[in-house]
Image (tube, rainbow, N blue to C red):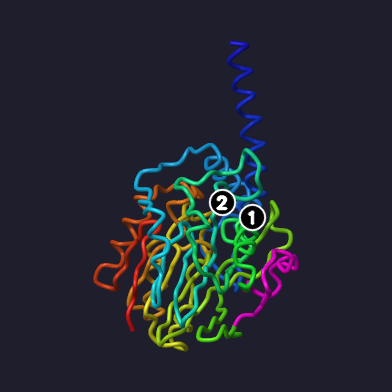
Amino acid sequence: MVGRAYAVARDLAVTVGMAVAVAALLGCSAPNHGAQVDGLAPAPIRAVGVMALGVGSALHLYRGDGAPVVRPVAAWRANGEGAVTWLGHAGFRIGLGGRSILVDPMLSERLGLPVPLAPRRMTPPPPITAIDRLDAVVISHADHDHYDRPTLRRLAARFPAARLVIPAGMDARAADLGFAATIATEEGRTVDLGGLRLTATPAYHHGRRDMIGLAPTPAVGWVIEGGGRRIFHSGDTGYGPAFRAIGARYGRFDLALVPIGAYEPRAFFGGMHATPEEAVAIAVDLRARRAIGHHWGTFALGPESPAEASRRFVEAGRGRLDARVMAIGETLTFGR
């Protein structure tokens, strides 16, 4: 009995410690842009809930069925004009307008700070050496799973002439990562990369780097235009009317990259992470011809399985648009 009681106490202490550590690493907090979702728990309770889910992630108590397939390393080089390659989680390599960019690359083995308790990837990251060209890295917000500073330092060391594009007010230290230039832009502003245009748009989310979000920073989505094509990368976001306005302003999108994971329980994540069905609604509001789901199958940030997230997304798209998921390392070429 004494031994069992000790084991229970030990496990409880480890769990609490891991909750605090993981909460410091995870970057999800309340939405911005005045998003209102019925039934949300109060902010402190939401924080505790996110911490608890983080513990499950750190302990690998996730349902890993349906994790995405990983393509061979050679496939990472096959990214030409009008093509996207999924890097896992929310990361994509995009070839458009004669430029090669990465959006939200997270290529580390663990999430957040390099400590033993940090959640580990379900699927291995691609090697940075497989990326043969890089003109710019584009970041949607400061959460650790989207703005991974170790990944960015390694990319800057390999491609020192590349530029870093971030939301204004996100990180004053971004200029120290080693890129040739850091460009901070506000919502509605456009960055011209010579053949490629990046416009920051609203997101129902914000970024944080601390445990309880004492200093939240802006989160954006990106309209990416070049070579007569237009795609959208959502970053992290809930669902709201901003997407219909974006679709009305910019016209039809050839491709929408939308988030489909870490959506349960809604009392914690509602309004800042879209469900798979809401992700389809985002793409429909954008008037997209095709939608690809991201933010799934790489880190366990919620209790749903990868199989559930991908299945619900594909099913929700039937009869509305071409909604699909990709293998990690798969390249999709999209037309005008």
Count of residue discs: 2
Q: Amino acid at mark 2?
A: Ser
Report whether 49 appears left or right of 211.
left
| Local secondary structure at mark 1 | helix
Give the label on residue 150, or none. Answer: 1
Of the image marks 2 and 1, the number of the one nearer the N terminus: 2
Report whether 271 appears left or right of 285.
right
On screen, residue 247 above or below 34: below
Give the label on residue 131, or none. Answer: none
Q: Residues within 10 Å of mark 2 (few under 14, many from 20)?
A: many
Q: Quadrant of residue 192?
A: bottom right
The image shows residue 199 at horizontal and vertical percentages of: 55, 82
The image shows residue 188 at horizontal and vertical percentages of: 59, 84
Q: Quadrant of residue 183?
A: bottom right
The image shows residue 106 at horizontal and vertical percentages of: 55, 57
| Closest to the observer, 275 or 127 | 127
Q: Residues within 10 Å of mark 1 (few under 14, many from 20)?
A: some
Residue shown at the point (54%, 70%) measured from the top left: 134
Numbered range of the magenta stretch: 164-187
Q: Between marks 2 and 1, how big is the CA–CA gap?
A: 7 Å
| Closest to the observer, 282 or 224 | 224
Within the magenta stretch, is there residue 185?
Answer: yes
Q: Which residue is mark 2?
A: 108
Asked whether the beta carbons under mark 2 and mark 1 sit within 8 Å of each other, the answer is: yes
Q: Quadrant of residue 174?
A: bottom right
Within the magenta stretch, is there residue 158?
Answer: no
Residue shown at the point (62%, 47%) measured from the top left: 48
The N terminus lies in quadrant? top right
The image shows residue 277 at horizontal and vertical percentages of: 37, 64
Q: Amino acid at mark 1?
A: Pro
